[in-house]
Amino acid sequence: MRIRRRHFKAAVLVSILAAVLTGCAKGAEPAAAALSLADIPIKPQQGKELTWNGNIPYDLPVFDFVDSKTGFAVKERTDAQLRLLSTQDGGTHWQEQNLPGKYIRSLDFINAKTGYALVEDNCSSSAGQLQCKQISLLKTGDGGSSWMTKWKSESHEDHSQGTPILHKLSFVNEKSGAMLVNDRLLLTQDGGNHFQTAVFGMKDFKPVSTSFLKSGTGYVVGTVGKDDTRLAVVKTNNGGRTWSKQLDLSAKDSPLSAFQIQFASENTGWLLTNEKGMLSGDVYRTVDGGKHWTKMSTQRTGRPYVNGIQLIDGNTGVISLHPGAGPIEGGIWLTKDGGRSFTSVSKAVAVNQVQMVSAKAIWAAVDGMNGSDFLIHSNDGGISWQESYPLSEPNGSPTKDIAFIDLQRGFGIGTQLDSGKVLKTIDGGASWKIIASLDSYIRLEKISFVSKKEGFMMAFRDKDPQHVLLKTQDGGLTWHEVSSESLNKLGISDVSAFRFFDTNHGVLFATGEGKAIYRTSDGGKTWGKTLVSKENSEMQVSLASYSSGWLLKQTDTKGSIELVRFGADHSEETVLTLDKDWYPDAVYFSDETHGYMLFEDFEAKDGVITRLLMTADGGRTWVDHPFPADAEMVDVRSIGFSDPQHGWIQFLQGTAVTADGGLSWSVQQ
């Protein structure tokens, strides 16, 4: 029976498999600093709770570009009023200003100065369901600097749909427009001063989506009947005084609705239906103003969910998809044959809205890793994409791995949109710029630099050999593959640690058939394997030198954490044991004395929290600093320090930095 130990144990020297674990070093290395061998139980010092300045996530539910250069978007946060974003240079620079309202329902700009916004106020959440008491139509004549309320009413908007299509405004000029609100279609001919409710002449007709192309002419799709078994398209040529039915559809096996109707010109338009129980819908197209509709194809409309369609001409258009709960990824799908077939054109997998300004210019709002949305755009019809907000290329923020060579200079890989980007910082990580794009690989995994010019990187591709070693000699601008038949035969499936110490000597820690350390002494041409564990138990490694480092491992399913120091003198030293139900996230030693460990604590009173344990004496004593409960760090990739004061933690949602030795952390934007 295992005895639970609620304390750290002082260092205990062992030598089992020491020679195997440390491998064969080339040349003599300085001896590791001596560690205490006294078997005296010590209690971890309880440090104060760390300060966490995390980002408050935001959504970008709507955006609208009036041409290739001028566009607007709305930033929505739960703790603040709306913010209007605007650009006059195609997304290179953005300005922010307040927009009245709490939640946005639609945005429609006529030109660079005049626009309308449909917003909700007086909102609260009950049983996880958002409810707002008031809805208002706002108008600006100065590009969003000021707004006037043109209309307001009690809100009956439905917030139950997770990714709604927020195309509720359709203005063709400063005077003439339509507004779909509270299951009614309201029409104006005087810029919103007065509205008339559209009367369609059909019993139980509920409008779902509308599209107006010129003053007086518009199309509406809606459900007919109380049991959602029919769908109809109607058209007006006289500003809504009369309506004529153009298309009548009936459900077969489940309730029938529509996602959107959208016209590219007076005669050419699209309709996407939604057969809710079947998770599918049909794409219909008309090229004669709605006199005839042709079914072009059937598309999946649930998991992933459709949240936007747009036809730019008779043949070219896009559909945006969000996966919701999965299982299939979303994205942006392009058609060039009027909707008969679609091709994925973006690496983004969770898209909230898409707009084609032209056949070449496409914009989209996408879910970000940090919980906030970001804007992307393409200038070549979807062949290539760039981030535009909050960071516009060549600026970016690394998401996969970081390597610093001094306090200011560092390199990173991966962005929110593209895992094939290489980035560089010269200001300690305050800002990053993309310096290279390696599109021939599925992803870049790990990076290490030995000087300002020379660096190495592990990449993954979809053909054999899948794992490839890359090298640069010009500071990351260009990369070439290192020919390595030995590396190809290692059977690596996941690389968790990687570091080169000079031109020839490098180490990687990876999962294959068990956990193993791999070493090269000829610049990556050949590699030797040292098996650490046949089991794929949780382990994290900090590589201190070619032959030495620190191994943080979970020895069984629940509890029993060990930190092991393996050295150049073929020794293995258990620095501490910890009998806690903690999950080891990362370990890092910046030198022989300063060390850091990150754990997920499953025994905390406030749920799962993250703990940072720090030592300044080579592991003899440790100070336990808990992060606050709201410091959510999902999928921690690494922790590192360039000196005892300056460090970073990289995780799925972003990068947190510290300048006071780890006592306070701020998540970078």
Image (cartoon, rainbow, N blue to C red):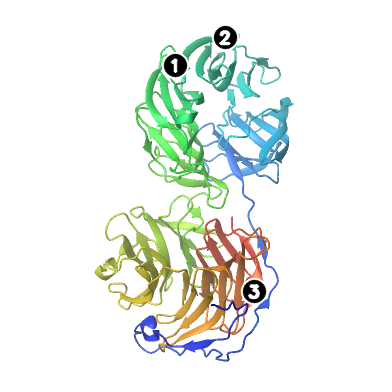
Compared across the picture, whether 506 is left or right of 235 comes to left
Q: Is residue 7 above or below residue 539?
A: below
Viewer-proximal residue among 186 and 176:
186
Dot 1: what SS? Answer: loop
Viewer-proximal residue among 427 and 269:
269
Query: Amino acid under label 1?
Result: Asn
Q: Which residue is mark 1?
A: 267
Viewer-proximal residue among 536 and 387:
536
Badge 3: how crowded within 10 Å, few (<14), some, or many (20+)?
A: some
Query: Amino acid under label 3?
Result: Asp
Q: Nearer the viewer, mark 2 or mark 3?
A: 3
Q: Which residue is mark 2?
A: 238
Quadrant including the C terminus: bottom right
Q: Earlier in the sequence, mark 2 or mark 1?
A: 2
Q: Is residue 4 above or below residue 216?
A: below
Q: Earlier in the sequence, mark 2 or mark 3?
A: 2
Q: Which residue is mark 3?
A: 624
Compared across the picture, whether 87 is left or right of 453 comes to right
Residue 145 appears in the rendering: no
Position of residue 519 measured from the top left corner of the image (x, y, whole percent): 35, 76
Query: Amino acid under label 2?
Result: Asn
Distance, label 2 to label 3, CA atoms, is: 73 Å
Position of residue 33 measured from the top left corner of the image (x, y, whole percent): 51, 89
- Residue 662 image-quadrant placement: bottom right
- Residue 105 image-quadrant placement: top right
Viewer-proximal residue among 538 and 391:
538
Q: Nearer the viewer, mark 1 or mark 3?
A: 3
Distance, label 1 to label 3, CA atoms, is: 69 Å
Dot 3: what SS? Answer: strand
